[in-house]
Image (cartoon, helix red, strand yellow):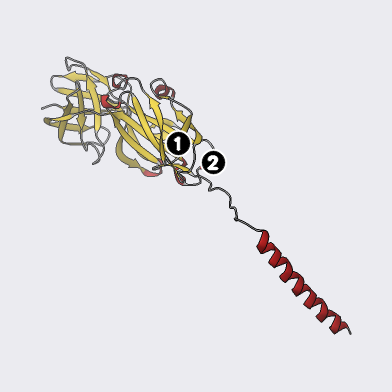
Amino acid sequence: MKNKIITQLAVCASIALMTFTSCDTDVVGAIYTPDEIAAYSFAAAQMNVELTADDQGKLKVPVYRSTTKGDAIITITADMTEATASIFTLASSTISFADSEEMAYAELDFGSIDNLGVTNRYTITLAIAEENQSPSAEGSIKIQAQRLLTWESYGTGFYTSGNFEESWPQPIEKAAEGNIYRLPDCIVQGYPIIFSLSEDGQSLIGFDAQATGYEYGNYGMTYFVYQGGAIMEGNTLNIPLYLCVILNGQYASLFGEAYVETIEFP
């Protein structure tokens, strides 16, 4: 008897399921799915840019989204040092995408190319404010911006390094834009040393902290840091420079004192 009841229940359940399914098929129309969730990103994690007068005082950084459907607005943030912030300002904290647009721009205003130092490199980090809108690694971008200079050969001089205790013939380049000099591949290939002299060429007026290309153990990159005292003797420039690493966000001298780097001009 028990088996008979179970069998009858199973049959009834099958009939009920068939009836429900049939009715469900009759009433269900289009099946709706949630709208695609847009993801936003920069093209890369880092960007190096050289600015000219043609940029008309604006540094434009492209931002992409994963869908072109509909209008959208996102918020971005900018992080920079006080010195950089005195020149660059974020034009707007929001970026707008029009329907069908895959890309829009974040804009940083710097006013005029003349506002940029000839040897300065400006570091700016932009980030998409809402983390859930940028699931990729490109949710932020570190920008290294500097003024583009036109370099021409000035001849071959001679370089003597007090920090590295070596000497060598050194090609020297001069910028068409002013009394600015570059020593290409000076300490390490790919890392130039850049500085500027007064109009009469008799004194050093600009030498920003800059990477040498040489890495010191676990401390990483070393930097030449100038704090004054350069002397021009004839055609030879003597620059006392500290060889530093970055420690706790600050330059720390490896030797505790400045050693003279000597550049003999051709």
Q: Quadrant of residue 82?
A: top left
Q: How many marks?
A: 2
Distance, label 1 to label 2, CA atoms, is 22 Å
Residue on which the image places disc 2: 131
Q: Is residue 73 visible?
A: yes
Q: Residue at x 75, y 73 (%)?
A: 15
Q: Is residue 254 visible?
A: no
Q: Dot 1: what SS?
A: loop
- In which quadrant will I find the N terminus? bottom right
Query: x, y (%) of residue 19?
Result: 73, 69
Q: Is 65 positioned to the left or the right of 201 in the image?
A: right
Mark 2 crowdedness (10 Å alpha carbons): few <14, some 14-19, many ≥20: few
Q: Is 52 positioned to the left or the right of 72 in the image?
A: left
Q: Nearer the viewer, residue 64 or 186?
A: 64
Residue on which the image places disc 1: 98
Q: Amino acid at mark 1?
A: Ala
Query: x, y (%) of residue 75?
Result: 51, 33
- In which quadrant will I find the C terminus? top left
Q: Is 196 positioned to the left or the right of 78 in the image?
A: left
Q: Nearer the viewer, residue 233 or 187?
A: 187
